[in-house]
Amino acid sequence: MERMSDQPGRWTRATVYPDMWANPDDDPRNSEGPSPDGELATLQDFMTNYRMTLRMKCEGLDAEQLARRSVPPSTMSLLGLLRHLAEVERDWRNWISDGDPLPKLYGERDGDFDGAVAEQAEVDAAYSALAREQEATDAALAGHPDLGERLGKSGIAVRELMVHRIEEYARHCGHADLLRERIDGVTGE
């Protein structure tokens, strides 16, 4: 007797390495060749690749799929992750600022996930907010190439902030893997 499942069939776009998200020639994160020189360039490269990975995990999905909370009882969705990371990018600037904190983008606790509704306007706004906040954080850090420099009221080292940013994106890219697989079965790194 064949058993019915509510789980989508697993598949990948990659044909060269079936555990990859895309074939090496099609992967914008392709890192063939020499790695960046220096610690700062290496950290920035990892940050760029994790940001790209998150966007890749969201590609090709409509508003309903992006907003779907596909791993219950978690309230996470891919759209919620986009909104959350925009909020986090903004908050990182608070860490390195001596001024008053920037206001939250989505209000109260979990507003980034709770407000992730299946509307195209919300999806467009989330992508726009994420790009804007990433650019602003990058610009704020561009003036501080010394990884040992301590910034803000708490005196966080630029290196510590960079590593924390990478950790945050890496963790959420792992969440995105599971969310995406439950939406349409697409797997891969």
Image: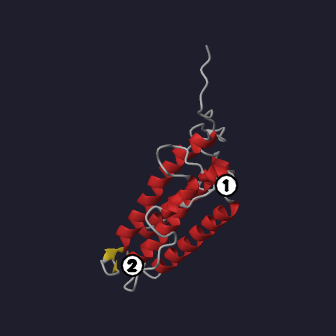
Looking at the picture, which amino acid does disc 1 mark? Ala
Q: Quadrant of residue 18?
A: top right
Give the image quarter of residue 49. Answer: bottom right
| SS class, disc 1 | helix
Q: Are marks 2 and 1 in contact (CB under 8 Å)?
A: no
Q: Is residue 109 visible?
A: yes
Please indicate whether residue 157 sits to the left or right of residue 141 in the image: left
Residue at image coords 57%, 41%: 181
Q: Kindly identify the amino acid type of the residue bearing the numbered disc 2.
A: Ile
Q: Residue at x 48, y 54 (%)?
A: 172
- Quarter of the picture holding the N terminus: top right
Q: Is residue 31 visible?
A: no
Closer to us: 149 or 132: 132
Which residue lies under the disc numbered 1?
63
Q: Which mark is residue 17?
A: none
Give the numbered dot on residue 96.
2
SS class, disc 2: loop
Please tell me whether mark 2 or mark 1 is closer to you in this view: 1
Outermost residue toward the bottom in this view: 99
